[in-house]
Image: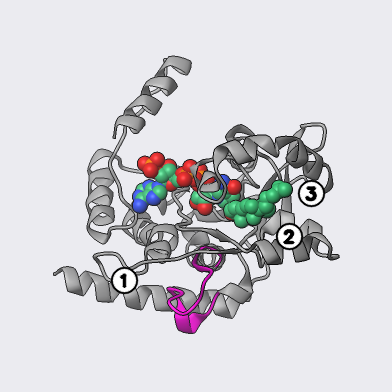
Amino acid sequence: MQRAEAARQALLTSHPESEVAVLKLDVGSIRSVLHAAQEVKLRYNRLDYLYLNAGIMPNPQLDIKAFFKGLFSSNVISMFATGEGILTQKDKTTSDGLQEVFVTNLFGHYLLVRELEPLLCQPEKTSQVIWTSSSNAHRSAFSLEDLQHLRGTEPYSSSKYASDLLSVALNRKHNQQGMYSSVICPGLVMTNLTYGILPSFFWTLIMPIMWLIRVFTNTFTLTPYNGAEALFWLFMQKPESLDALVKYHSLTSGLGNNYTQPHKMDIDEDMSEALYKKLQDLEDEVRQRLN
Ligand SMILES: NC(=O)C1=CN([C@@H]2O[C@H](COP(=O)(O)OP(=O)(O)OC[C@H]3O[C@@H](n4cnc5c(N)ncnc54)[C@H](OP(=O)(O)O)[C@@H]3O)[C@@H](O)[C@H]2O)C=CC1
Ligand SMILES: CC(C)=CCC[C@@H](C)[C@H]1CC[C@H]2C3=C(CC[C@]12C)[C@@]1(C)CCC(=O)[C@@H](C)[C@@H]1CC3
């Protein structure tokens, strides 16, 4: 909570007229999500925006061989833009008996949205739910038969693809009640997540190479400020005008200009419906276990 309090103080310094409240929430714990949602319902009557940003990539491993192979292939730009085929992770089980990446990146958020539906879906008003997804969300990493990615080595990619599917399902279910869901990708940003892949001094050393690569992909946004471009852009849009089947990417040009670009997602609407059904079944199961 110390960092949250520091962020609150920083926000109050830059925007003294605002009200900023903090609330403890571990999206990786079912109890914590239910408890925090209860607290939100006590404090507020409605929500206009819900940003689902929390995410983890534990124990990332870079496949050096695949990286050098990719470097000299026709897929090199796509490899730098999405990290496809060169990153794996090691997942673990939480005390709720769920896979940590699945529950932190997807299921905890799903449960939070379910709990907060009464505050998000209100007559005559619109609300926006925004997921921080990733260009690393690949259909090939996801399976409806292995939602939690127990059998694979790319739980991060699987969980992000699942968030894309879930956003589509949420739109189908709740647009008529005024709730709209979107997914964004911030691009490659230097944060604790990327410092887990390579140490920060190494990223600093290769920064000139990264600026060069940015000229070819525009996906190397590199700073949190640049990465937030799509969030800001979405905030300025009318939710009814957004395309549910699109992911909004924050991009930074070689000259350092930020912009947002929509990319059609590789999504099958039946699959998104099937995922929603499976999440509902799991929700029933975990709620029963808690009672
Ligand atoms: N960095 C990148 O290149 C990219 C990142 N993303 C996504 O952006 C999002 C933010 O990640 P990023 O800032 O890069 O990484 P960081 O590791 O720097 O930040 C992760 C954030 O998620 C929060 N978080 C992690 N686990 C939990 C949990 N169990 N409960 C509540 N909050 C949690 C952390 O909170 P706390 O500070 O309290 O620990 C922190 O605010 C993630 O969803 C990530 O997948 C997507 C594409 C690219
Ligand atoms: C830039 C150089 C010379 C080397 C770095 C190689 C990789 C470590 C790097 C290349 C593309 C990156 C990437 C990600 C992580 C680091 C890379 C694999 C992500 C998968 C990080 C998390 C995300 O959500 C994606 C959007 C990133 C995609 C690109």
> Quick one: label 3, few (<14), some, or many (20+) residues within 10 Å?
some
Which three-letter amino acid code belongs to the residue tagged 2? Met
Where residue 201 sits, quadrant-wise, is: top right
Labels 1, 2: front one = 2
Say whether mark 2 is within 8 Å of ligand 2. yes
Marks 3 and 1 in Cβ contact (< 8 Å):
no
Which three-letter amino acid code belongs to the residue tagged 3? Thr
Marks 1 and 2 in Cβ contact (< 8 Å):
no
Residue in the picture at 77% in, 40% down: 209
Residue in the picture at 36% in, 43% down: 46
Span of residues in magenta: 142-157
Spatial distance from mark 3 to mark 1, Cα to Cα?
A: 39 Å
Q: Is residue 65 magenta?
A: no
Asked whether the viewer can see residue 128, the reply is no
Q: Nearer the viewer, residue 18 or 9?
A: 9
Spatial distance from mark 2 to mark 3, Cα to Cα?
A: 10 Å
Residue 98 lies left or right of residue 214; in this view the side is left
Give the labeled residue for mark 1: 283
Give the labeled residue for mark 3: 217
Decide: is 129 above or below 17: below
Marks 2 and 3 in Cβ contact (< 8 Å):
no
Labels 2, 3: front one = 2
Indicate the secondary structure of the residue bearing disc 2: helix
How far from the left and from the top, in percent, is residue 190?
Answer: 59, 40
Decide: is 223 above or below 32: above
Q: Which mark is residue 79?
A: 2
Residue in the picture at 65% in, 38% down: 222
